[in-house]
Structures are given as structure tokens and as C-alpha cells.
Amino acid sequence: MVQGVGLEYRDYNDLQSGMVRKTRVSSADLEWVLSLQGAVLYVVRFESNFAKKHLYTSTKNAATVQAQLANFAHEPDPTKRLAQAKLAADEQKFKTQLAHRSPAEQKCVSPGCNHKNDEHAPGNGKCNAAPKSLQPPPGALPGQKVKKVLTAVPCPCIRFTSVYADKRLAQGKPDANPLLGATGLTCDAIWMDRIDAKLFEKVVVDSIVARMNSLGANPWAVDGEEIEWDFGAPNAGCVLKVEPNSTMREWIAKGYRKVTVTVKRDNKDPTKPIYVICHLDGKKTA
């Protein structure tokens, strides 16, 4: 649980280095307790992999930044050189996060499979896919000339596993695949380090209150209401469309500052309504 806006981390034992490191808690375990409006305390939670997928943070790895400094040796001002190195390190980190959602890292790598997780039995079980291919008809003898027919061939995979999940398991991280779900080659990301936490909190709460007021006596939609988060002109560039073949400077130059999210509401306790952020519509980023 986080008081206000922020990300939460937990310790884990890195099996490869033997060191205790930190990793972000999963989206399902992240909860923001936001400001009190009158007698109402607003609580925000996240569905599925939303927080890991859309809330990006700058690198905390000093060695990564240090490794980038050599690329900016031509910059005589040490302050500017460090800023450029940090920006390059963040670009590298963000592209790595994007790659973790790619089909190459998320599709099953069990022999003969290459299918998505939702094509497998729950709990990373056997693959249920049965793609059709041309096969000899039942009863055909080996070497016999027959007309082949389209036949469903069950996938031989007995367990879902992916490049990304295998890597995290080898590291000993508690959540094997926090990005499980729809794959993507681009991502709309809110750059948390570029937005003041109090402003972020105000934007979230104000947007919820504004939607409540606009609904009047109408109930909150069961499937969620679309809400815009506008972080303001001074924060232009805090929302990024991360792509593999463009640069951080290009992402920032687009000046995006608004996202549209789908929010579900649990109002069992009217003094502590829980709002669940479940989707970001990249087509409406502005």
C-alpha cells in the first residue's frame, strides 16, 4: 500500500549474484491511498499488468548511467554530460521494458509451440491450440498416394514458458511474468519521474470527482468509465509513445501530456470507494 502516488518495491534474493535486490510489486498488489475529499477516502488499484506496462520510471542503476558517459565525452559541461547519459540510460531501459512485451519474449518457447499464454490451460498448463495442416486422411498407409485433408493437429506443448518468464525465474524474482497478457511492439507510458507526486494525485482524484459529477444520478458503468488524465502543459513530454526504432528525444519532442484510461469502481463502502485502473487507450494519447 502506498500513501499517495508512487510505486512499491520488495526485496528478493538474486539467485545469479547472491545479492538482495529490489523489484517492483505486481500490479495486483499495488494500491494508492489518495487524498481525502470531505469524508471520502479515494483508493486506486490496478488491474492485470497496467502498472508494470504503463508506469515507467528512470533507471536507478548507477552503473548503467556510468556506462553511457563515454558516449558523451564530447560534452565539456559535466552536468550536461551526466544529464545526457541519464537520458540515454532511460531510453535503453524503456526499450528493454518494451521488448519484454514483444511476441519474441512472451510467446511460448516450449518445443513445437510458439503460441500465446491464453491458448494454454490456466496456470501455465498445456497448450490447447490445434492448428490445421494438410495431413493424410485417417487410415492411409505409409507411402500410399492419397489426397491430403486439413486436419487439426494438437500442439505437443505440455507447459507454457517464455523467454521473459524464464529469465525472471532464473533471477529468483517473486513474480515470474508481470507483463503476461497482450503483446505489443509499442507502448504508451507515463514517465513517473517527470510528474510531481502531488500533482499526479490531484489529477487522478480530480478526474474521478469530475466524472462522478458528470454522471449525476447515473451509476458508474460496470465495464468502467473513460477518464482523461491531463498532467498540464508544463509537463509536456511526460507521456511517451515508446517505440523500438526511435529515440527518447523524439518521444519527448511529441509533447504528450494526456492519457485516457478506463476506470472501474467498487463502491461497497461509500466512504472508501476503490477505483481500478484497467486500460489505457493509446489512440487517445495527446
Image (tube, rainbow, N blue to C red):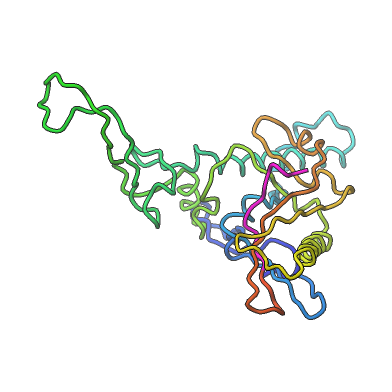
Of 244 and 266, nearer the camera is 266
* Residue at 36% from the left image edge and 39% from the top image edge: 113
240 horizontally vs 121: left or right: right
Seen at 76% across and 46% down, the residue is: 239
- Location of the C terminus (image quadrant): top right
Left or right: 107 in relation to 212: left
Identified at 54% across, 39% down, the residue is 102
Q: Is residue 234 left or right of residue 122?
A: right
Q: Is residue 281 found inside the magenta-colored segment of the image?
A: yes
Q: Quadrant of the rendered structure where residue 162 is?
A: top left
Residue at 79%, 47% in the rendered image:
238
Q: Quick check: 198 above or below 140?
A: below
The answer to whether residue 163 is above or below residue 149 is: below
Give residue 267's position: percent from left, percent from top. Answer: 65, 74
Q: Is residue 191 left or right of residue 223?
A: right
Name the residue furthest front: 217
Count how many numbered circles sit on residues in the image.
0
Query: Which region is colored magenta?
Result: 275-286
How far across and how far down the image is residue 126, in percent? Answer: 33, 50
Residue nearest the viewer, comparing 198 with 147: 147
Does residue 219 belong to the magenta stretch?
A: no
User: Residue 170 in the image: x percent, y percent?
Assistant: 46, 51
Q: Nearer the viewer, residue 116 or 74?
A: 116
Residue 86 location (% of width, % of height): 77, 42
Instruction: Quadrant for residue 73, please give it.
Output: top right
Position of the N terminus by quadrant: bottom right
